[in-house]
């Protein structure tokens, strides 16, 4: 493949044509996007082949089709997830990272680069289609797929059917108190899981920053103020916890505590999905860890340095874009860590009666950028009450506590929504009621 051959496909979708024009505006971009396709095919051959992508032109055609793709899955696979992974896999290649706003807490309040904003626009346009009646045409395939039909008999059954794919995706339980009962609803000491998700872990907040330890090294570069977009310092010695949802999970969030909603808003920012290669299978997957694995960091940084050494001079690329540093970097340090700070996310802050404030942040991932809040400032919520939901894809859920709490869940453990996940007080939990 010649890296200097520009794409020629003229899409019927204006948004895809915009991407082509952006690439073709500068020979350096043409080269780097061709390199991105080449490295994506090399490192993820099975998934790229499944979507018919071998060149930059075929990738543009893929983007065009994805905008109006009617979601479906076969009886064993997961085309829904694979298509999103392949889309972001190309943008996650080292040669094109410089055109995107860095995924870092330090950039959480920066204006987005052209390409990062294009990704937001793409997610929005696809989301519009997924709210149309046409998008629901193949929903029956999800009822036949073992990844998606778990407990299908407990789902709600709309009398007039599903109005769109997003209507189905944000489905409710027919009787949530039977399907997912709230743990100890009368005991305010108990904190429940806000989302059906895999628990990733918890980290203390020290002097207003998240404390993350990797191989014995402490990192304090994640300011909680930027995550919450607040100037208040009441969270400075609290706790941060992270969990993630997959496409087949229940996508509504529920209050982990009882109290008054003192803040409820959506923070519009990036759409992003970390995609990594499974070295054992050769397939790509969504990397939802709080930081990227060392092998994946090495792959991305190593290739980046290689391409930068191929004759580029000066402080920027030929098109004036910023260049990533080619200096030797510590491969054990976080890479694209703290992406929660940069994503489109909801923010719901609940003031409890005895235990301070609790912030719940449903965080959009990739095409799941539509975070819909079902509560507003001033509402009283009971533990287990629905507070928000996602539309389409996989997503994250973060909780931030004003004070330190005691977690019972283990990392990588799948926890059902409204199950007990922690307690406020450092005491054995008796299970008895504490109010009313």
Image: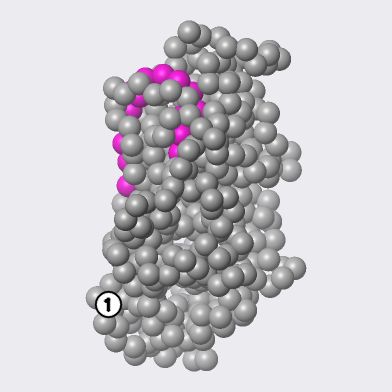
Query: Residue 325 in the image: x percent, y percent?
Result: 52, 61
Q: Dot 1: what SS?
A: loop
Q: Which residues are magenta?
A: 253-269
Q: Main secondary structure of the magenta part?
A: strand
Q: How many marks?
A: 1
Q: Quadrant of residue 430?
A: top right
Q: Which residue is mark 1?
A: 13
Query: Residue 2 in the image: x percent, y percent?
Result: 49, 91
Q: Is residue 267 magenta?
A: yes
Identify which residue is drawn at 29% across, 86% down: 10
How busy is the neighbourhood of tag 1: few (under 14 within 10 Å), some, or many (20 plus)? few
Query: Residue 359 in the image: x percent, y percent?
Result: 44, 29
Identify which residue is drawn at 55% across, 42% down: 196
Q: Does residue 435 lie above or below 229 as drawn?
A: above
Viewer-proximal residue among 54 and 321:
54
Q: Is residue 318 magenta?
A: no
Looking at this view, name the residue that lies furthest to the front.
159
């Amino acid at each position: 493949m010649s890296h200097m051959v520009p794409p020629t496909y003229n899409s019927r979708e204006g948004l895809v044509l915009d991407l082509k024009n952006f690439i073709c505006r500068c020979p350096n971009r043409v080269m780097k996007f061709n390199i991105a396709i080449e490295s994506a095919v090399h490192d993820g051959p099975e998934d790229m082949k499944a979507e018919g992508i071998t060149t930059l032109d075929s990738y543009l055609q893929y983007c065009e089709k994805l905008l109006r793709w009617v979601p479906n899955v076969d009886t064993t696979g997961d085309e829904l997830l694979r298509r999103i992974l392949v889309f972001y896999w190309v943008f996650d290649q080292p040669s094109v990272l410089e055109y995107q706003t860095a995924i870092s807490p330090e950039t959480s309040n920066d204006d987005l680069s052209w390409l990062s904003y294009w990704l937001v626009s793409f997610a929005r346009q696809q989301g519009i289609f997924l709210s149309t009646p046409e998008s629901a045409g193949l929903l029956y395939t999800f009822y036949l797929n073992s990844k998606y039909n778990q407990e299908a008999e407990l789902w709600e059954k709309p009398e007039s059917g599903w109005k769109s794919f997003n209507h189905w995706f944000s489905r409710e339980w027919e009787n949530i108190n039977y399907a997912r009962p709230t743990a100890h609803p009368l005991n305010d000491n108990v904190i429940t899981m806000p989302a059906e998700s895999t628990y990733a872990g918890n980290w203390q907040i020290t002097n207003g920053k998240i404390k993350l330890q990797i191989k014995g090294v402490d990192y304090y570069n994640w300011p909680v103020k930027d995550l919450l977009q607040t100037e208040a310092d009441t969270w400075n010695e609290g706790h941060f916890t992270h969990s993630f949802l997959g496409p087949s999970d229940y996508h509504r969030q529920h209050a982990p505590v009882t109290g008054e909603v003192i803040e409820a808003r959506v923070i519009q920012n990036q759409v992003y999905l970390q995609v990594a290669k499974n070295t054992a299978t050769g397939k790509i997957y969504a990397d939802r860890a709080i930081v990227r694995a060392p092998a994946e960091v090495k792959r991305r940084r190593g290739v980046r340095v290689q391409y930068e050494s191929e004759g580029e001079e000066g402080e920027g690329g030929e098109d004036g874009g910023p260049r990533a540093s080619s200096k030797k970097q510590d491969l054990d340090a976080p890479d694209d860590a703290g992406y929660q700070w940069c994503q489109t996310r909801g923010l719901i802050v609940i003031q409890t009666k005895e235990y301070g404030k609790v912030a719940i942040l449903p965080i959009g991932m990739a095409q799941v950028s539509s975070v819909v809040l079902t509560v507003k400032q001033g509402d009283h919520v009971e533990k287990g009450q629905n507070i928000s939901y996602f539309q389409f894809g996989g997503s994250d859920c973060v909780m931030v506590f004003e004070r330190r709490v005691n977690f019972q869940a283990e990392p990588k453990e799948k926890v059902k929504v409204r199950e007990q996940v922690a307690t406020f007080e450092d005491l054995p939990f008796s299970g008895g009621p504490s109010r009313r």
